[in-house]
């Protein structure tokens, strides 16, 4: 036994057209989403470039600070040298004054 179903070809084509329209809409939506994603990636890339620039600037600041610390350490070392000269100088002046006092030098 065979069954024959008759349908109008226009009905089938109309259903197919509707499906193609929905598929085109979905493809358009996907293309729009991909476009927005490309924009987001471009923005993100710009931000990472800015971040890299900030890191470079920070590295330069750290290098300069390191140089400044080294210079400060040298200056402190120099001051320690001067400090070691102050004590003997003070002792020499004090010894001279005491010598004048004990010898009874007449300052008139």
Image (cartoon, rainbow, N blue to C red):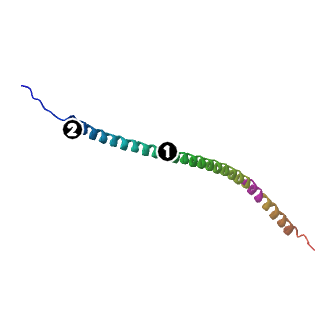
Residue 42 is labelled as: 1
Q: Which of the pair 78/55 is nearer the observer?
A: 55
On screen, residue 43 versus residue 31, left or right, reads: right
Q: Secondary structure at mark 2?
A: helix
Q: Which of the pair 30/44 is nearer the observer?
A: 30
Q: Callout 2 environment at 10 Å: few (<14), some (14 to 19), or many (20+)?
A: few
Residue visible at 80% across and 64% down?
A: 94
Vertical comparison of 17 with 70: above or below: above
Residue 78 is labelled as: none
Residue visible at 25% across and 36% down?
A: 13
Residue 11 is labelled as: 2
Q: In the orientation shown, which residue stands out farthest toward the right?
A: 108
Nearest to N terminus: mark 1 or mark 2: 2
- Disc tally is 2
Vertical comparison of 101 with 85: above or below: below
Estimate the x, y position of residue 26 in percent, counting from the top left. 33, 42
Residue visible at 33% across and 43% down?
A: 25
Estimate the x, y position of residue 73 in percent, counting from the top left. 68, 51
Estimate the x, y position of residue 78 in percent, counting from the top left. 74, 53
Which span is picked out in magenta?
80-87
Estimate the x, y position of residue 7 in percent, counting from the top left. 17, 35
Q: Nearer the viewer, mark 1 or mark 2?
A: 2
């Amino acid at each position: 036994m065979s069954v024959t179903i008759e349908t109008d070809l226009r009905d089938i084509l109309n259903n197919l057209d509707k499906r193609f329209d929905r598929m085109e809409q979905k493809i358009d939506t996907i293309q729009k989403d991909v476009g927005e994603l490309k924009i987001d990636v471009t923005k993100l890339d710009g931000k990472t470039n800015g971040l890299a620039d900030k890191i470079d600037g920070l590295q330069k600041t750290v290098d300069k600070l390191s140089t400044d610390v080294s210079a400060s350490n040298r200056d402190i070392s120099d001051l320690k040298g001067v400090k070691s000269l102050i004590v003997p100088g003070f002792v020499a002046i004090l010894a001279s004054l005491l010598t004048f006092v004990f010898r009874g030098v007449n300052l008139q």
